[in-house]
Image (cartoon, rainbow, N blue to C red):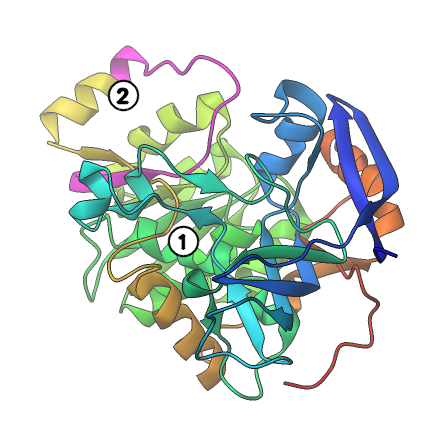
Amino acid sequence: MTKKMQVVQMHDVGDIRLEEMDIPSPVPGEVLLKIAACGVCGSDLARMYKKGPHKLPLVTGHEFSAYIAELGEGVEGFEVGDLVTVPPMLPCFECAPCVQGHFSLCENYDYYGSRRHGAYAQYVAGPAKLLLKVPAGLDARAAAMVDPAAIALHAIWRTNLTAGSSVLVMGGGGPIGLFAVQWARIMGATRIVACDVSEEKAKLALEAGADEAVTSYDDLLAVADKGFDVVVETTGVAKVADQAVSVTARHGSVTLIGIPPAEVEISAASWARLMRLEINICGSWNSFSAPFPGKEWTTTLEHMARGNLKWKFMITHELPLDKVDETIRSMYERIIHSSKVLFLPNGADLPTN
């Protein structure tokens, strides 16, 4: 008899059900992954309660770590019990961007939690060659947070940040923002300001290493001086892109990570500033480079293992699978305060790596 597992499956926008499903069997080249922890990404909120995924029904969730439970035929270099962090993108490795090593721009990718079953489940199967072993001693919860940390690093590397730079992180109290604050400090920024919507998130940004944390645009203008050399925008709130430009310094750069749910306008004043101060605006998408999954991922693991990159302080919830719908719906409706929310599908008693 085929063994069953619990999953949280999406059948339509807002129709999220705790169900049973067959535990998948790994095909040649794959492994069966026993999910240790899966974090909530901001994209999950809109995917599950507003716009829907690429296919239905679907098990969502893509920020995860796992223990290898079974090896498929031909898999080498891994053993049952290994703790791995799982890059959520599965590139085709054949399109022009992939051939050039720009895996974040793959034209024919697969993706856990939006195009294939993800990790709001007890198990998932996937290609072994795309996994990264976690350094000995690193917590499985930290391994589930490599994705947002790598996204922040990918964005920082898109800027002109150098030692001595001043940096503003918009949305600095969310997970990606909190990692961006830390990366800016690691890379030598001498002044880091975080802006977010609440005192709770401002306190987290200060704990991450921000020199100052503000909770309104007026307060931000009061501390902006002549502007910031680097601005990282993580919120996706439509008006924040304009605000970001308005506080960027001469020859500064704005990097956009957040995905806006509405049209974005740049005001006439900000447009004039953009041109006259020769400000650069760039987008940042995902977290991958060559060799896959890229230095963003390996650098994140190295800094986490050394203790240079803090993660535990930003966890506000650790919950079982049966709380997925209730919790993420509350996040979408802004009923609860949260930073990093983790689900532990197989229980909180995680094995020691």
| Residue 333 drawn at (x, y percent) | 76, 28
Q: Residue 260: within the magenta?
A: yes
Tag of residue 278: none
Sequence-wise, which precedes: disc 1 or disc 2?
A: 1
Which residue carries the number 1 mark? 152
Seen in the picture, residue 232 relative to 289 is either above or below; the reply is above
Given the image, on which type of amino acid does mark 2 rest? Ser
Q: Confirm whether residue 307 shows in the render.
A: no
Residue displayed at 56% across by 57% down? 27
Q: Nearer the viewer, mark 1 or mark 2?
A: 1
| Residue 156 drawn at (x, y percent) | 30, 53
- Quadrant including the N terminus: bottom right
Given the image, on which type of amino acid does mark 1 rest? Ala
Residue displayed at 29% across by 38% down? 105
Span shown in magenta: 249-270
| Residue 80 drawn at (x, y percent) | 62, 79
Which residue carries the number 2 mark? 270
Locate residue 76 relative to residue 106 in the image: left or right: right
Q: Residue 233: within the magenta?
A: no
Q: CA distance from mark 1 to mark 2?
A: 25 Å
Residue 76, quarter of picture: bottom left
Q: Confirm whether residue 283 shows in the render.
A: yes
Seen in the picture, residue 99 relative to 316 is either above or below; the reply is above
Near-viewer residue (161 or 328)? 328
| Count of picture labels | 2
Near-viewer residue (337 or 116)? 116
- Quadrant including the C terminus: bottom right
Residue displayed at 41% across by 58% down? 150
Characterize the local packing of mark 2: few (<14), some (14-19) or many (20 or more) Cα atoms within 10 angstroms.
some
Locate residue 33 relative to residue 205 in the image: left or right: right
